[in-house]
Amino acid sequence: MTGLEAALRKAVRGDVGFDVTSRALTTMDASNYRRVPLGVVAPRDADDVAAVLEVCRSHGVPVVPRGGGTSIAGQATGTGVVLDFTRHMNRVVSLDPEARTAVVQPGLVLDRLQDAAAPHGLRFGPDPSTHSRCTLGGMIGNNACGSHSVAWGTTADSVRELDVVTARGQRLRLGQDWAGAPAGLRELVDGELARLRTGFPELPRRISGYALDALLPEHRADVARAFCGSEGTLGVLTEAVVRLVEAPRARALAVLGYVDEGAAAEAAAGLLPHHPLTVEGMAADLVPSAAALPRGGAWLFVETGGTSEAEARARAEEIVRAADVLDALVVTDPAGQRALWRIREDASGTATRMPGGTSQPPRAGGSSEAWPGWEDCAVPPRRLGAYLRDFRRLLGSHGLRGTPYGHFGDGCIHVRIDFDLLTEAGVSRFRRFSEELADLVVAHGGSLSGEHGDGLARAELLPKMYGDDLVALFERAKAVWDPDDLLNPGVLVRPAPLDANLRFSVLPRKPVDVAFGYPADGGDFSAAVRRCVGVAKCRTTAVSGPAVMCPSFRATGEEEHSTRGRARLLHEMLAGEAGGLVTDGWRSTEVRDALDLCLSCKGCRSDCPVEVDMATYKAEFLHHHYAGRRRPAAHYSMGRLPVWLRWVDRLRLAPLVNSLASVRPLAAVAKRLGGIAAERRIPRVAPETFGRWLRRRERERMREWTAEARKGAGPELPRTTVHLWPDTFTEHLSPDVGRAAVRVLEAAGIGVLELPGRPWKVARTEDGEVAGVGMSAPWGRPRDRACCGLTYLSTGQLDQARAVLRRTLDLLEPFLLPELDEVPELDEVPGQEEATGLEEATEPPAFVVLEPSCAAALRTDLPELLHDDPRAARLAARVLTFAEALERLAPDWRPPALNRPVVGQTHCHQHAVLGDASDRRLREAAGLTGELTGGCCGLAGNFGFEKGHFEVSRACAEEQLLPSVRGASEDTVVLADGFSCRTQLEQLAGVRGRHLAEVLAEGLDRESQDGAVPPAP
């Protein structure tokens, strides 16, 4: 233990972390920069803050205050001690509805303040797009704004008083009329009145530099306001009194379509006299699909408020009439507005992956990386159109691309640019462009920062905006507050070079040898890890809508259990001996422990704006970490579950296994040996597998059809057929789901075929063309079974997963032929079974997968792991969920009218990979009403069964799923398509969840009994 660490542990009551993990988690924020701290302290109160400052001052170590770590300019990174306020100092201390004020701590997440204010009809005005994870301390430090700043201003406009501890331990309460001013500040201002009155540009989004003009007499010498935007360089905030505003009772959103970005920018300032709440702009190149938007190449999102929906709509329609638009849309439905706003809020992450690329080679899939650095310049709104045109020209002259968007009503533009920050030449171009863009912004009367602060990205260029004399005044002000330069040195004054401390400099330049293909990242694992830009959407403390990411963070509140935290540790692992904190590579215990609570829910694959896929990264890491080493017991017991269950079936041991599992002492021994949580019950194995039932049923039907044929009556054949995938869970643990699916599919006119249990031979001509297919193995060979490899994938046994999946592709070879439409039957092959129907195929056969996690594995993991086998992509393309099969193959079929409410949870893999649009439409057609919750059930395959995971697993279930089920009425249907979800419901709530196929089959049987439809054959 170092002397500094020992002194801090003795002095503070909060958490002190000098370990590799604690430091790695705070090396970066959401910027291009990386600085490695000595340690991290999570103070419990202002006394702890003062104690940290005293210890660090005595050791000559800098201190950096940090909130949610979403800063885009690098000011939340540092080389000394980082103060993390999110862990303990994160409360609403009090809220006064009459005075419309709240007292808050710096680590409070903005959305939690909004939640506290909402019952009183109030809200905090500024609302950055990171509102679900940014903190009030960070907002004050950066003077954050958000989309409603045209109505409610910046954070500085909402601050009344601030409690601050200076670097030398003074406790000040900042306010107006010089309240709390440190000694010497007033004298400094009084001697520079003329410079302060003329040196600052007049515009609504001037965030750069220190707001010393707030100290002028005509501004009531507002010390609290002047402190806002100081980026942790003047003092450490411990508490704030903030102003709240009245929230409109109703809102309307007018989406205005324009021909292009320039037209939208020119129009924005003209809408301000109508007093909108927002005027946000974005162009078509940032919108994945413009289907929900009015016609145009760029749009303004203009929000209005009112005491009623009619009043809000009337104001929105007035703006539409006043605007010269190509097309327009007015939305008053809250859900519709949220869906549209989500497009805008995800832009900062979406813009990080651009189609094509010019400054660096595009990756497979046609995307290139784009980065912040010039994320939030602001110009007077009336000059925005001209500035954007000049900005685009400047980009083109440097061979760069970017997609501007943002707060058009305030003249503040966000943009991610495809800088090459990996090579020396690219970094040089980054510097040249930055210098020229600073000149351009100043020429338009703008501010280098209009929202996120200067940090490491722009502070070096402040003389271009303010001149040397005013920047020197900033340095004198800093010296008044912090004469020892203890607080966040290198930021705002005496700055570090803007091209130093880049986070990419320590990463390997050659691709890392990995198992997965990472097609969206050109096969480069480093590029995959670089996807995480730190916007921290994974750090949300509550589920919003159908979202899933990141359940383990919400359960623990620990950064290392967020997607971003894990990405940071992987970044340090890849950096290795080039400067990374993690130096033992794939053998790292720090990375292993951080990934241990990753549920592999894949929520980040869809909910993360840049589609970080931590489930895949976890599988990759475990594959390397345990290579040639003994694995945890759970990897053998549950990771190889298909093997064990197949042997149970072959030896007819299901009754014996179930009996032994019901004896508590024996079950306890089995769970201990298998690495299974003691709190779990071992699921029962079905006495008859789904496959045996299906084969027995087919034999019975063949006999019936033969009898009918002898009588001269041919059987009624289905319109089309599908292959029902024999996933391990349906096959061995819940065959009722498979039987129900067969019942429904056949009622819809879809025949069901079992996948072959033995390989088929593909005969080819001398020219390589397919001549025919047929069974090539002898009758006596044991049946094999297709498998998605899910349990091997989730435990990182990728060699076994690859072998299982290749065997599956070999087994399905005839069904994956590109020439399938022309394949004739091959009669000469010895041992050929009944006709496969291939000779009559008019389209590639579909594979219906009932278990969502297995379908997701086939859709994504299969082609990414076997990226060198074209059959993998063909199989993935033919995988259908149960609802997709009914919608696509039986579009005219109508399900039974069930007319009942439903509760449950959309399976996390369904949400993240497969999508649930078909399921929603099927439920609606069947009269199943109600929305399924978001989040994750917490069991997540093997995760919730593993020893040490039970509490986190239960916490995940208690977040959304279990409360929704407990609050449901008696006639409510509990839907759970995943075996894990059904098991979690049964074991934690005593509730039987059902697959949608089971619910529909019951409805069909009920109609059959009532005489509405004939029973299934």
Image (spheres, grey):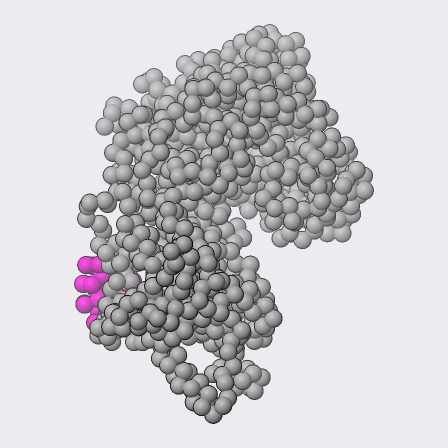
Foreground pick, 80 / 1011:
1011
Foreground pick, 231 / 374:
374
Question: Could you tell me which residue is drawn at 41 percent across and 54 percent down?
Answer: 767
Question: Could you tell me which residue is drawn at 75 percent across and 35 percent down?
Answer: 271
| The quadrant where residue 781 appears | bottom left
When the figure is inspected, residue 470 is found, relative to residue 420, above or below; the finding is above
In the picture, measured across the screen, residue 977 lies left or right of residue 728, that is: right
When the figure is inspected, residue 184 is found, relative to residue 314, above or below; the finding is above
Foreground pick, 162 / 918:
918
The quadrant of the rendering that contains the N terminus is: top left
Residue 670 in magenta stretch:
yes
In the picture, measured across the screen, residue 649 lies left or right of residue 542, that is: left
Question: Could you tell me which residue is drawn at 57 percent across and 7 percent down?
Answer: 469
Q: Residue at the bottom extreme?
A: 711
- Where is residue 301? Give x, y as percent: 68, 41
Give the magenta-colored segment's residue range: 660-682
- Where is residue 791? Give x, y as percent: 32, 56
| The quadrant where residue 649 appears | bottom left
| The quadrant where residue 300 appears | top right
Q: Is residue 392 visible?
A: yes
- Where is residue 691? Give x, y as percent: 35, 72
Q: Is residue 184 visible?
A: no
When the figure is inspected, residue 262 is found, relative to residue 605, above or below; the finding is above
- Where is residue 57? Give x, y as percent: 36, 19
In the picture, measured across the screen, residue 302 lies left or right of residue 600, that is: right
